[in-house]
């Protein structure tokens, strides 16, 4: 479990940097959806290039398709990339206004609540995880921290309140995405799972962007700063590493580890490289509360009945049928 939480922390730190990069790109383009589309396009090109030279990725895609055909996966479980597209678009739309730290805290609250539900339903590869009092207390502290961090800005007006609600809703979607990505990774490997996510996410964003272009026209020309196009590469790391770690620690603990890394990274970014709203004492206090919630909920939960995990149950079925 420590290794899984360490990987989750790295995913969170990468997500904080990605939020800043995509937010800045959106500000330059004056179009959050276009920035998200570019981010996904960069990641998709890299993954498709890797698939051309690495037969293991192509084999993984075929394995996922075979699993869908055999009924081991449903087509809906291959659509996690749409949730990733929503998160990236939310980053681009909200970070320039509310800052990386508040975005991270709001996203964290949604992830934690969603992680509790997803683990309780057993949707991830780690199997069904009971909603223990420790997990409820930890999640409650994290949500309280989100509220404290957002309090000073939520009173600034309806626009800020609505913008903070967007990443919270996206966090709930991410919990489901992490669960289904773990299943895809268990069958086809993390690289194939990442490629599936980027294909689906790019397609969804392209449809949305074309609809917006039809209404308001072409956005500003892309900027020349190469660092603004790193969001796609960071997205590959986020999806791939997350798909690995969720098989070790489950959806809730993955979300908690990501929260910890994201908050540390977001606080450092807003402190050292401020953009948008200034870092406030309330945001720092909220981050401390969320960190405390992470520490509480990450305490080991004794395994209960039916906790073998989806991947383990899948192997057992194959053994019985062989």
Image (spheres, grey):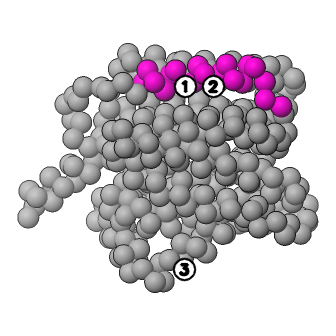
In the rendered image, the residue lying farthest to the bottom is 53
For residue 214, say whether it is visible: no
- Residue ID at (87%, 60%): 29
Q: Tell me if residue 273 comes above or below residue 62 in the rendering.
A: above
**In the figure, 146 relative to 103: above or below?**
above
The residue beneath circle 2 is 287
State the image coordinates of residue 316 (x, y, percent, origin top left): 14, 52
Q: Is mark 3 on a helix, strand or loop?
A: helix
Q: Which of marks 3 and 1 is nearer the N terminus?
A: 3
Q: Is mark 1 on a helix, strand or loop?
A: helix
Q: How far is mark 1 from mark 2, CA to CA?
A: 6 Å
- Compared across the picture, whether 272 is left or right of 171 comes to right
Disc assigned to residue 140 = none
Image quadrant in which you'd find residue 277: top right
Q: Nearer the viewer, mark 3 or mark 1?
A: 1
Quadrant of the image containing the N terminus: top left
Nearer the camera: disc 3 or disc 2: 2
Q: Position of residue 160 (x, y in %)?
A: 82, 31
Report the span colored magenta: 278-297
Q: Name the residue under label 1.
A: 291
Q: What kind of secondary structure does the magenta stretch mostly adopt? A: helix
Q: In this view, does 318 lie to the left or right of 236?
A: left
- Contact (CB < 8 A) between labels 1 and 2? yes
- Mark 2: secondary structure: helix
The residue at which mark 3 appears reads as 49
| Label 2 crowd (10 A; few <14 / some 14-19 / many >=20) | many
């Amino acid at each position: 479990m420590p290794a899984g939480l360490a990987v989750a922390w790295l995913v969170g730190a990468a997500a904080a940097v990605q939020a800043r990069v995509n937010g800045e790109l959106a500000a330059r383009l004056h179009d959050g959806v276009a920035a998200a589309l570019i981010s996904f396009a960069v990641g998709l090109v890299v993954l498709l290039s890797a698939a051309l030279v690495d037969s293991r990725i192509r084999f993984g895609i075929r394995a996922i398709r075979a699993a869908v055909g055999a009924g081991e996966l449903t087509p809906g479980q291959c659509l996690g990339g749409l949730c990733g597209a929503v998160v990236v678009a939310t980053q681009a739309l909200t970070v320039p206004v509310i800052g990386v730290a508040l975005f991270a805290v709001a996203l964290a609250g949604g992830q934690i609540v969603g992680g509790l539900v997803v683990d309780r339903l057993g949707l991830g590869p780690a199997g069904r995880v009971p909603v223990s009092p420790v997990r409820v207390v930890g999640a409650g502290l994290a949500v309280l921290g989100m509220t404290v961090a957002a309090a000073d800005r939520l009173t600034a007006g309806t626009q800020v309140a609505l913008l903070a609600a967007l990443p919270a809703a996206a966090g709930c979607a991410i919990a489901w995405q992490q669960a289904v990505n773990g299943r895809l990774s268990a069958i086809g490997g993390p690289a194939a799972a990442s490629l599936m996510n980027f294909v689906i996410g790019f397609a969804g964003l392209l449809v949305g962007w074309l609809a917006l272009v039809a209404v308001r026209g072409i956005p500003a020309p892309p900027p020349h700063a190469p660092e603004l196009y790193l969001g796609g590469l960071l997205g590959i790391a986020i999806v791939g590493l997350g798909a690995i770690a969720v098989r070790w620690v489950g959806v809730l603990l993955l979300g908690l580890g990501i929260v910890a890394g994201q908050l540390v990274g977001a606080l450092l970014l807003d402190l050292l490289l401020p953009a948008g709203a200034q870092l406030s004492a309330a945001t720092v206090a909220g981050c401390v509360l969320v960190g405390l919630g992470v520490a509480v909920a990450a305490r080991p939960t004794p395994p209960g009945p039916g906790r073998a995990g989806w991947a383990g149950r899948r192997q057992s079925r194959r053994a019985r049928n062989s």
